[in-house]
Image: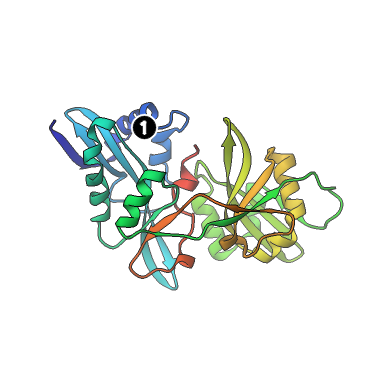
Amino acid sequence: MTVELTPITEADLAEVADFLSVNHNDRVPWESACSTVPWKMEAPNFGFMLRDGPNVVGTLLALYSQRRVEGRVERFCNMGSWCVLSEYRSRSMSLLDALLAQDGYHFTVLSPDDGPREILAWRRFRFLDTSAALIPNLPWPASFSRTRVSSDPQVIARTLAGAELDLYRDHAHALAARHLVVIRGQEACYVMYRKCRYKGIPVFAIVLHVSNPDLFQRALMPLTRHLLVRHKLVATLAELRLIERRPRMSFELDSWPKMYRSADLEPAQIDDLYSELVCVPW
């Protein structure tokens, strides 16, 4: 076998999408998910791939972003789908090595499968604490609260300001991200979430960002009612690192493992944004 490792360029995306659709997940619009990253960033590549002659035989996707952390501009690389045909598995590590050889990035892996977790831990990736609360979305009476919940893009854009407005604009067109604002008096809370499928049907909301955890907690009834009535989602999964404490009307839960590798960032400085969780709707 003559196997070549190369960066994934824009010209390769159609082939990579076909490969992932056949060998990984045929429900995901891979080409759109990879090529339509909505935030501004000059990415060095879309990840790395293995070719045997003209055929794609393995891929490791990557999403890049530039973030401001504690007043400093930091560069992030989010590791996406890692898929290699069985007869080429011996070359899998070359994809990871190529990705990690890129200097100046903090690396995140937010949905690692069982096998890669051990490999990533060996390569100095650390686990995040993803303890979570599962909150039932119930049909609470609509008249009990003066809280307003809206998914209207115009309302969201009009309500948010500063860094939160920038965050919304960066993610407004991400394929997997959903957005809403909770408004009570002069307070507002921006919530970003994605839908989780069970047997092919979207039934859960997985929270990715909460701008005001205190208002999120106080507005749980109208918020979860909105998700049930307007979006047909029966429960909400929220990690405690986002909402600070488990609500009384919830169940304790472990979310999926998430990992990161950084020389100087702490776990609290790592989040789910600018990643495959907002761009890849599986």
* Residue carrying label 1: 20
Q: Please tell me which residue is depicted at 43% across the width and 31% down the height of the picture.
A: 25
Give neighbour class at mark 1: few <14, some 14-19, many 20+ (Cα, 10 Å): many
Most foreground residue, 188 or 23: 23
Most foreground residue, 275 or 93: 93
224 left or right of 35 in image = right
214 left or right of 85 in image = right
Say which quadrant the N terminus sits in. top left
Residue 54 sits in quarter = top left
Q: Helix, strand, or loop for circle 1?
A: helix
Picture layout, residue 187 above or below residue 256: below
The amino acid sitting under disc 1 is Leu
55 left or right of 259 in image = left
Residue 131 spot, x, y in % from top left: 56, 57
Residue 171 spot, x, y in % from top left: 51, 50
Q: Please tell me which residue is depicted at 50% across the width and 38% down the height of the picture.
A: 281
Most foreground residue, 251 or 223: 251
Residue 80 sits in quarter = top left
213 left or right of 44 in image = right
Q: Please tell me which residue is depicted at 30% across the width and 45% down the height of the picture.
A: 47
Residue 143 spot, x, y in % from top left: 87, 51
